[in-house]
Image: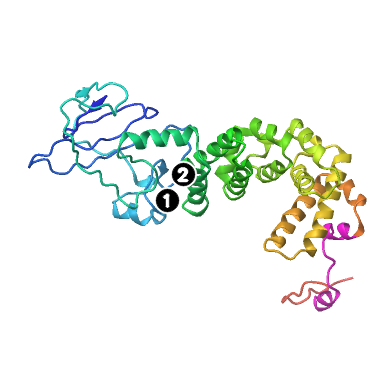
Amino acid sequence: WICTPEPGRLLVFDGSLLHGVVPHFDHGPDAGERLTLMVGLWGAEVTREPLAPRPGANAVLPDEEEDLPEWARAAGMQPWADCGPAPSAWAPQLEGLMHVGVPLYEPIAGAPAETSELRVPDLFRGRFFVRDHWEVDQNVREEVQPTLERLEALARDVLAGTPNMAATERLVGGLVRFWGGAAEEQDPEEALQLLLGTTNSSAFGRKCAVEHCDFLLERLRHNGFVAALFWNLLRDQDVSDKFASAQLVTQLEPYVDGSGDPPSNLAAGALSFLPAELVPEPLAVAAAKALSAALANLYSEDYDGAAEDAEEHMEALSFLATKHPSVVGKLDPEAQGRLQPPAPDPAEDADMPDKPVSAEPAADTAE
């Protein structure tokens, strides 16, 4: 269907359908320029993001005026608390729809060969504009069968730019589809690395991963490095309960073999954030020993990120010791020392008064 623009015309439609605005076909002297305003009414089930420094879709107005970005102030926008119903100068006109067949980009009878140029503001954030039907086809194909190059470009936007929930959801879903259907000549490990980066730096990325829990569990069965992904996910208390299960423990357990290999350490780290009732005591001890040995190696390493890796392993070991206190006694003295709070410095204690000093005079005492 196509709806021709008229003053005061309002078109309302199901936003889940493929839709768009086509350049106008009138090239006469009075054609002028058309400005199209699109307003999306999002239901509560649609994930929303804060109003960003650049204009974009699916955003929420802040409650306070000082939280409005510059472009919103320039556009005269008000904070949500100050908003109210605005009077309408036009009554809705729902007539004027023409059926043009499916798909929409089939040639329309009577349309000239040339159309006016579609100008897209440079400051707009998002992939909302297409110029011909080939681009539509390409966009759809990229969503269904994403290429590694496309996913890498999308990951750069998500990880380095303004947080964009729609792009993050596309990225996580695309990585899972690529990973699940990668050809032999393509390395799915690259998809895993991109997914690790996304879930490590993006809270919304971790939420998106919840939808693919079954797929990730199946991949963990064949690839111990997937344990690093579950380590990221289980550290986030907002989503950890979605992944915590006896099945996950069963999948992680074979990797905790005391070998000191990366999969063993990664599985131990993931187990540390699971509820105590899901992890048997012998497995908790094995995981604690694996993390302790990994820590000893990390403290002796000298590479970029070694200190951060050591901090994450220490965090996991501390969580494990808190949930399973008995594992501490099974560790070597050096590891036990790391888990103990530092002893107070006697020199500092000597400078401290035994009792608080009061400016008030001492009260008289009576027998």
Q: Quadrant of residue 209?
A: top right
Q: Quadrant of residue 97?
A: top left
The residue shown at (82%, 37%) is 254
The residue shown at (25%, 35%) is 22
Amino acid type at circle 1 is Ala
Quadrant where the image shows the N terminus: top left
Residue pointed to by mark 1: 52
Q: Quadrant of residue 182?
A: top right
Quadrant where the image shows the C terminus: bottom right
Q: Give, as a single range, the part of the protein colored magenta.
A: 334-353
Amino acid type at circle 2 is Glu
User: Residue 134, percent across and down?
Assistant: 34, 35
Element class at badge 1: loop
Toward the left, the furthest residue is: 29
Name the disc covering residue 49, or none.
2
User: Residue 257, percent across and down?
Assistant: 85, 43
Could you say which is closer to the camera, residue 118 or residue 77? 118
User: Residue 356, percent across and down?
Assistant: 77, 72
In screen coordinates, is 79 left or right of 33? right
Tell me: residue 253, above or below residue 50: above
In screen coordinates, is 337 left or right of 238? right
- Residue 280 visible in the current orientation: yes
Element class at badge 2: strand
The residue shown at (86%, 71%) is 366
Are the residues flagged by discs 1 and 2 in contact, CB closer than 8 Å? yes
User: Residue 330, percent across and down?
Assistant: 92, 50
Binning the other alpha carbons within 10 Å of mark 2 as few (below 14), some (14 to 19) or many (20 upward) gives: some
The residue shown at (56%, 36%) is 178
In screen coordinates, is 98 left or right of 164? left
